[in-house]
């Protein structure tokens, strides 16, 4: 190891002190801004007309700490947009994007920008991480927020993300997605997965926006958003809506009588009043009972395709609840997080290298 | 023979017409029912070549035939449904039979 001269050591020490001081100064400013935003007086009397919100480093809904940061950030974004402020999102520190968290970010921003009531003015800074910038450019997020594209999309992790969105059940733009899924997963599982995607989109259109979400923001287009990522044999598909969630839509959908839903909830046991129980109830009802006009089969079919593949996983987030099913072990996990994502997100994950050739008897 | 991918769409999805351009209701009303009424022999319906078939589409297209007035026994006698994935064939018939049970046929 090279020995540093006295002058070099002095320089390094001075730089470290400056950077530490600068870092602490920025942290203190952020903390003060957040304290102002959290104060009850803010909403009523704020004279701030513009604000910079720092996006969290990691966009994930699965990991507790990341989820809390993402949801707090989105909550503040909604507050500031509803207060009529010009918001600048600082994406500088963003370094990790998972399909679930990223999809929710895109969906919420689209919702705010599309609200006729708010006429939200949201802009952003370019991310410092070049892969993150490529991804945001690839899915059109930077352009929506006023940043012109400046990167060539070449990173292998970015090229294989596809993004779809809509307000009706229209799959005409997904032929290329199906072709890629067939390459990675085989045509049988790809067909099942596309059927599951159709059902998730249909559920979003039918049930997610059954009533206003209750955050005071009027929405013009009630949409769904989809990400698909396939790289190194791993396939992730995530579909999101920013509606009322399964807990509120299930009793109001008209598919099942309320007494039937209550009976299933009672049979699931657990004294806690969990959003995750409603996800489980929706699955149980679809598997074991016939709904009005034979509806309600969509969620169980999404689960069944993971069971058939005998590998992969399904995760359903709805408001605070999450239900995960792991195909290899046949294990199901349900839990409630402390905070609500305000919508529903369904995510499949498959490792193509570990899939058992499925449905060998299908063509007999 | 009706091949859904060529006679209707490669992208069938959704239940009602209001859901989207290629819904189960549109397939039933615009393709299936006219074909059943005009054909006197067996009607062969092929589900292959599509970008997946969700339960909402299948149930509305086939279960909806019973709600539209066709008897399940008549459909079993007059219609053949084929799909490379046999589970989807079975589902279409299951929806017809469940719709018949609900309609007390």
Image (tube, helix red, strand yellow):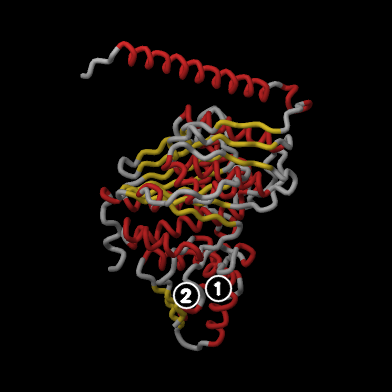
Front residue of this view, candidates B44 and A95: A95
Determine the secondary structure under disc 1: helix
Task: Tell me whether the residue at label 2 lies in contact with that at label 1, contact meaning CB atoms closer than 8 angstroms.
Answer: yes
Whether residue A202 is visible: yes
Determine the secondary structure under disc 2: helix
Chain bearing mark 2: B
Chain bearing mark 1: B
> How many dots with numbers?
2
Q: Residues within 10 Å of mark 1 (few under 14, many from 20)?
A: many
The image quarter containing residue B104 is bottom right
Q: Of the numbered discs in the image, which one, if any, rests on residue B27?
A: 1
Could you tell me residue A102's position as x and y percent?
Answer: 50, 42
- Quarter of the image that includes the N terminus of chain B: bottom left
Farthest residue, direction right: A45
Q: Residue at x 72, y 39 (%)?
A: A216
Please say if B60 is above or below A284. Answer: below
Gap in angstroms between the C-alphas marked 2 and 1: 8 Å
Horizontal side of residue A362 vs B48, given as left or right: left
Front residue of this view, candidates B65 and A81: A81
Q: Can you identify the residue that label 2 sits on? A: B4
Could you tell me residue A188's position as x and y percent?
Answer: 34, 61
Q: Residue at x 71, y 37 (%)?
A: A82
Please say if A245 is above or below A33. Answer: below
For marks 2 and 1 on the same chain, the one whose residue lies earlier in the sequence: 2
Q: Residue at x 51, y 45 (%)?
A: A103
- Labels 2 and 1 positioned on one and the same chain: yes
Q: Residue at x 62, y 36 (%)?
A: A88
């Amino acid at each position: 190891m090279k020995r540093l001269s006295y002058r070099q050591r002095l320089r390094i020490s001075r730089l470290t002190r400056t950077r530490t001081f600068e870092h602490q100064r920025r942290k203190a400013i952020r903390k003060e801004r957040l304290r102002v935003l959290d104060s009850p007086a803010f909403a009523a009397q704020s004279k701030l007309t513009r604000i910079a919100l720092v996006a969290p480093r990691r966009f994930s809904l699965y990991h507790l700490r990341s989820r809390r940061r993402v949801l707090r950030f989105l909550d503040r974004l909604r507050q500031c947009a509803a207060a009529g402020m010009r918001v600048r999102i600082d994406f500088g520190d963003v370094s990790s994007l998972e399909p679930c968290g990223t999809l929710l970010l895109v969906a919420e921003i689209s919702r705010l920008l599309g609200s006729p009531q708010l006429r939200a003015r949201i802009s952003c800074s370019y991310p410092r991480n070049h892969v993150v910038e490529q991804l945001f450019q690839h899915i059109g997020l930077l352009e929506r927020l006023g940043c012109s594209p400046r990167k060539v999309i070449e990173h292998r992790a970015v090229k294989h993300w596809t993004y779809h969105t809509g307000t009706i059940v229209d799959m005409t733009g997904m032929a290329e997605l199906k072709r890629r899924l067939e390459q990675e997963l085989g045509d049988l599982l790809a067909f099942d997965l596309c059927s599951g995607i159709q059902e998730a989109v249909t559920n979003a259109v039918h049930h997610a926006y059954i009533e206003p979400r209750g955050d005071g923001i009027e929405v013009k287009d009630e949409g769904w958003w989809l990400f698909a990522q396939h790289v190194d044999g791993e396939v992730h598909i995530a579909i999101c809506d920013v509606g009322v969630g399964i807990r509120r839509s299930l009793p109001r959908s008209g598919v099942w009588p309320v007494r039937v839903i209550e009976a299933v909830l009672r049979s699931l046991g657990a004294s806690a009043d969990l959003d995750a129980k409603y996800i489980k109830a929706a699955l149980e009802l679809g598997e074991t009972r016939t709904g009005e006009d034979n509806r309600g089969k969509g969620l169980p079919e999404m689960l069944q395709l993971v069971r058939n593949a005998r590998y992969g996983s399904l995760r359903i987030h709805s408001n605070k609840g999450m239900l995960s099913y792991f195909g290899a072990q046949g294990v199901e996990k349900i839990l409630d997080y402390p905070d609500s994502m305000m919508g529903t997100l369904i995510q499949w994950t498959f490792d193509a290298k570990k899939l058992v050739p499925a449905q060998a008897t299908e063509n007999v | 023979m009706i091949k859904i991918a060529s006679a209707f769409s490669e992208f069938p999805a959704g239940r009602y017409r209001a859901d989207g351009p290629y819904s189960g209701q549109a397939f039933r009303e615009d393709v299936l029912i006219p074909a059943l009424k005009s054909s006197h022999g067996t009607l062969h319906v092929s589900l292959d070549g599509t970008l997946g078939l969700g339960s909402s589409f299948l149930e509305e297209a086939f279960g909806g035939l019973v709600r539209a007035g066709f008897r399940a026994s008549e459909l079993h006698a007059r219609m053949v449904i084929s799909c490379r994935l046999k589970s989807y064939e079975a589902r279409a018939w299951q929806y017809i039979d469940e719709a018949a049970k609900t309609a007390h046929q």
